[in-house]
Amino acid sequence: MTSPLTFYTAVKQDAESQQKMQQIQAAIPTMRDALINSKIVHFARFVAVPNPGGQGVQAMMVITEFDESMDSYVEFFFNDPSINKAFTLIAEVSVNPPALPLNLNDFINWVARNNLSKTDDSMFSAYTQSVAQILNKFSAGA
């Protein structure tokens, strides 16, 4: 069963936080390996919501579709150094951050609090297979 995450957090407007947003955006490609190696993420994207005037970032979203429970999903990425580092930066610029340094329980609760997709009802999927099933099916003949 595929589950959604639509993580949303408002971003502080001070110069240091806005600079960190640039670091976060630059780090997105480095997380690709962790997403691939998870074998549970169908799709993932990061969205920086610009301020109305176009200067700086007002908020950010991490939108993913994944297999397994939310807690195990979040724990997998908490334990990955590249993603943990990125989420630590996200926490630092968030208007309502968790306590730092991040610990697993606070991180899970923070992600859950900021998840706009509280149920699976908001999502459509054209298939029921897990990422692992899809990879097994299409890598068998390769």
Image (cartoon, grey):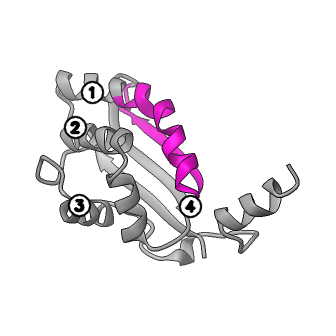
In the rendered image, residue 123, in percent from the top left (x then y), is placed at 60, 69
Q: Which residue is mark 2?
A: 93
Residue positioned 23% across, 61% down in the render: 104
**Residue range of the region highlighted in magenta in the rendering:** 24-53
Residue 105, placed above or below residue 87: below
With 109 as the anchor, is 36 left or right in this view? right
User: What's under tag 2, amino acid-wise?
Assistant: Val
Q: Residues within 10 Å of mark 1 (few under 14, many from 20)?
A: some
Q: Which residue is mark 4?
A: 40
Image quarter where the N terminus lies is bottom right
Closer to the camera: disc 1 or disc 3?
A: 3
Marks 4/1: CA distance?
28 Å
* Helix, strand or loop for disc 2: helix
Q: Which residue is mark 1?
A: 20
Marks 4/2: CA distance?
27 Å
Q: Residues within 10 Å of mark 2 (few under 14, many from 20)?
A: many
User: What's under tag 4, amino acid-wise?
Assistant: Ile
User: What's under tag 3, amino acid-wise?
Assistant: Leu
With 48 as the anchor, is 95 left or right in this view? left
With 126 as the anchor, is 82 left or right in this view? left
Q: Which residue is mark 3?
A: 104
Which of marks 3 and 1 precedes in the sequence?
1
Residue farthest to the right, as pictured = 141
Residue 131, placed above or below residue 128: above
Residue positioned 33% across, 38% down in the render: 86
Residue positioned 66% across, 70% down in the render: 124
Question: Is residue 119 a member of the stretch shown in magenta?
Answer: no
Which of marks 2 and 1 precedes in the sequence?
1
Marks 1/3: CA distance?
22 Å
